[in-house]
Image (cartoon, rainbow, N blue to C red):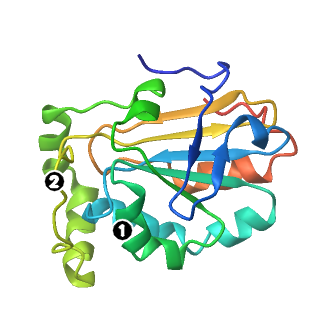
Amino acid sequence: MKLSVGQKAPEFRLIDANGDTVDLHAMRGQKVYVSFFRNTACPFCNLRIIKLTKALPQWQKEGLQVVFFFESPNRIIKRSTFCDTLPGVHLVGDPDRAVYKKYGITSSVLKSIRTVFNRENRKDLKDIKERGLRNLGSQKDNDRTLIPGDFLIDETGTIVKTFYGKDINDRIPMEEIETFVQTRSGLSKAS
């Protein structure tokens, strides 16, 4: 079931790929960006992370906590380039997708197929090819039709923005994250 703006964010307490405890409740008093990715071999996921790497350090400096979930296990995430390129970001393996389910992240063959017909995605596919992100391998037991989701959570643990992808490359616009970070209170009118 999809989550809505105004709901308390479902709690989670897990160990990330670096062995640190990631506890949403312990992040109260801080703004939090939670994002759900497919797996570390997903080319669209890799491209999204490349795009985020420029903005993340500034957002973190302004107090934003960042948690990225992957359906890959922590040992695979640890071997990925993400651990080196995303300092301070909690990279959490959730191969059973328990937290994905709490946040209403689902799979859809139709939405996956829709990905190729989106003009913006075709540009990203070209970028993926040029960056050599197409052949990152495959990971057993991963869901090729998993649709991403993004959530902005305020200092009280309340969801102020939900974003459920329309296809496997559809993500919350970075400008919306920037606006969330810049607002004095996470209780902005984002929806």
According to the picture, the residue beneath numbered tag 1 turns out to be 47
Residue 161, disc: none
Q: Residue 158 in the image: state x and y as whole percent.
A: 71, 27
Residue drawn where x is 61% and y is 48% of the image: 176
Residue drawn where x is 81% and y is 45% of the image: 30
Q: Residue 93 in the image: state x and y as whole percent.
A: 43, 51
Residue drawn where x is 34% and y is 64% of the image: 76
Q: Residue 102 in the image: state x and y as whole percent.
A: 47, 25
Compared with residue 125, is residue 67 higher up or lower down, i.e. above or below? above
Sooner in the amino-acid sequence: mark 1 or mark 2: 1
3 and 88: which one is in front?
Answer: 88
Quarter residue 104 falls in: top left
According to the picture, the residue beneath numbered tag 2 turns out to be 140
Density class for disc 2 (Cα within 10 Å; few <14, some 14-19, many ≥20) is few
Whether pointer 1 and pointer 2 mark residues with C-beta atoms closer than 8 Å, the reply is no
Compared across the picture, whether 99 is left or right of 42 comes to: right
Density class for disc 1 (Cα within 10 Å; few <14, some 14-19, many ≥20) is some
Compared across the picture, whether 73 is left or right of 7 comes to: left
- Image quadrant occupied by the C terminus: top right
User: Element at badge 1?
Assistant: helix
The count of marks equals 2
Give the distance between the C-alpha atoms of the residues marked 1 and 2, in whole angstroms: 21 Å
Identify the amino acid type marked 1. Leu
Compared with residue 47, is residue 178 higher up or lower down, i.e. above or below? above
Identify the amino acid type marked 2. Lys
Compared with residue 164, is residue 46 higher up or lower down, i.e. above or below? below
Compared across the picture, whether 136 is left or right of 163 comes to: left
- Image quadrant occupied by the N terminus: top left
Residue drawn where x is 20% and y is 43% of the image: 143
User: Element at badge 2?
Assistant: loop
